[in-house]
Image (cartoon, grey):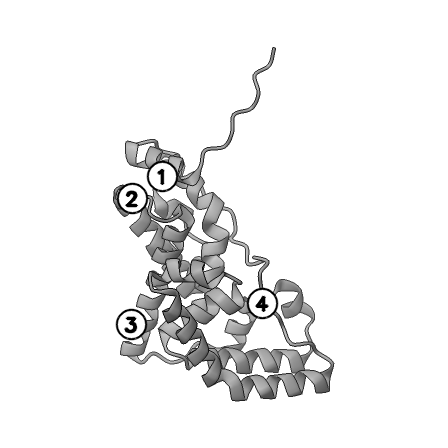
Amino acid sequence: MASEPSEPLSDSDLLARHVAGEPDAFGELVRRHRDRLWAVALRTLGDREEAADAVQDALVSAFRAAHTFRGQSAVTTWLHRITVNACLDRVRKAATRKTSPVDDTERLEQLLEPHESAEAPAERQDLHRELLAALGTLPAEQRAALVLVDMQGYPVAEAARILDVPTGTVKSRCARGRARLAPLLVHLRSEGRETGELSPGRNRTQRASVPPASEPSDTGTSDPAGVKGGGGHT
């Protein structure tokens, strides 16, 4: 009599096995969560290369700090917190260096849904470009809160756990960010009505997909460098 297939291991079990030295456990965790980590990083940073590097930094940090996980939150929340922090670190460093802004067209192509970037009319692309430019003017903490709540569709409580701040802080950051964007949003709604476009809602469906991770030939998936998020250097 054939045995029934075993239940897949939970995230916490996989993390525990990684800490215990099982070589493939961390790679399986990455395969489960990299798409959402990638989506958050890309929408926060607006640049494919920066997002890939931020996800890589986050995975390396998680790989090394797995033994510090105490189970006070879900593993996915822990991973998202590390990823958001990696993104915010890059935003702050970029502001300090006063780097030139990323080309708006390139940013737009990465942030739009695939079908939109291929088929959207020029008017819609212009509206998206304006929205991205406005998001880029927000303080990093407000931008992160808005990305999680308004663009990724996380509940406020979950976003608070990811950002490691009280729910009231998330609400206030979102409110301040929305207030700063309000004049532009009014303009976008007006433009949308004139062009027949509907205002985009929250993107609760994760469509930003990371290409499959390359498997190192001699080390398996235990090395986070072998599972870099999509859009890495070519």
Mark 1 is on which residue type? Leu
The spot of residue 117 in percent (x, y) is 63, 69
Q: Which of 74 and 152 is in front in this view?
A: 74
Between discs 1 and 4, the one toward the N terminus: 1
Residue with the mark numbered 4? 202
- Taking the image as shown, residue 117 lies to the left or right of residue 234, namely right
Q: Distance between the residues labelled 3 and 2?
A: 30 Å
Q: Distance between the residues labelled 3 and 4?
A: 29 Å
Q: Is 41 located above or below residue 219 in the figure?
A: below
Dot 1: few (<14), some (14–19), or many (≥20) neighbours within 10 Å? many
Q: How many labels were placed on the picture?
A: 4
- Taking the image as shown, residue 66 lies to the left or right of residue 8, namely left
Q: Distance between the residues labelled 4 and 2?
A: 32 Å
Could you say whether the residue bearing mark 4 is in a helix, strand or loop?
A: loop
Mark 3 is on which residue type? Lys
- Mark in the foreground, 2 or 1: 2
Q: Residue at x 57, y 20 (%)?
A: 4
Q: Can residue 45 be seen in this view?
A: no
Residue with the mark numbered 3? 93
Residue with the mark numbered 2? 70
Q: Residue at x 34, y 55 (%)?
A: 58
Between discs 4 and 2, the one toward the N terminus: 2
The spot of residue 206 in percent (x, y) is 56, 57
Check if mark 1's residue and mark 4's residue have beta carbons within 8 Å.
no
Quadrant the N terminus occupies: top right
On residue 15, the disc is 1
Between discs 3 and 1, the one toward the N terminus: 1
Could you say whether the residue bearing mark 3 is in a helix, strand or loop?
A: helix
The quadrant in which residue 221 appears is: top left
The spot of residue 13 in percent (x, y) is 39, 35
